[in-house]
Amino acid sequence: MKSYDMSSLACDHGFVGKVRISERAMDDCMYAAEHVVSEHGVTPLERFQMLLQNVASQLSGYPAGTQAVRLTHHRIPPCGNPHQPLALELEALVVQNDRQHGDYLLVARHDELNHSLLAAA
């Protein structure tokens, strides 16, 4: 699964350490219909920052040492697709000893992780 290092931006929203966001979770924030952006005044980057803030807020409610959490993020504003649900199911999990990236927190769409695990099996 492709992911992006968002550690420097994530630290502005309460994260400590390396944070990687999956490609599909990132795409979900970045692709919004133009009329939605102009109507709500929220840019794709601001949508992404809202995702980071929401995930950080939800993770802060778990005890230290928690390795994996399933979260619900509500897309505000919605992307403009009437068939896409407002709620986005995410998982945040600690990845350790990754050969390429070391230790980090991965935030990915729940369905994306399931596909990756099936492909790895």
Image (cartoon, helix red, strand yellow):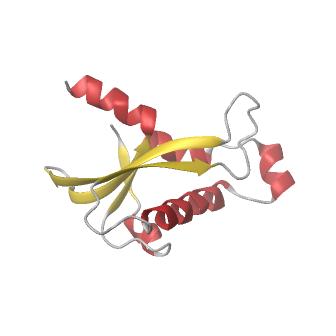
Q: Quadrant of residue 51?
A: bottom right
Residue that lies at the very extreme toward the right in this rendered image: 39
Residue 32: x %, y % from top left? 69, 44
Tell me the residue at 25%/65% (across/down).
65
* Image-based side of 112 in relation to 54, left or right: left
The picture places residue 30, in percent across and down from the top left corner, at 60, 48
Q: Which residue is nearer to you in this view: 77 or 61? A: 61
Q: Please tell me which residue is depicted at 36% across the width and 36% down the height of the picture.
A: 113
Residue 60: where, in percent of width, then height?
Answer: 43, 69
Quarter of the image for the C terminus: give it.
top left
* Residue placed most toward the observer, 74 or 50: 74
The residue that appears at 32% across and 58% down in the rendered structure is 105
Residue 67, placed above or below residue 83: below
Vertical placement of 105 versus 113: above or below?
below
Q: Is residue 22 visible?
A: no
Count of numbered labels shown in the rendering: 0
Horizontal and vertical percent position of residue 54: 55, 61
In which quadrant will I find the N terminus? top left
In which quarter of the view is residue 6 placed?
bottom left
Q: Is residue 37 visible?
A: yes
Up the image or down, 87 lies above or below 104; here it is above
Q: Residue at x 65, y 54 (%)?
A: 44
Image check: 1 left or right of 96? right
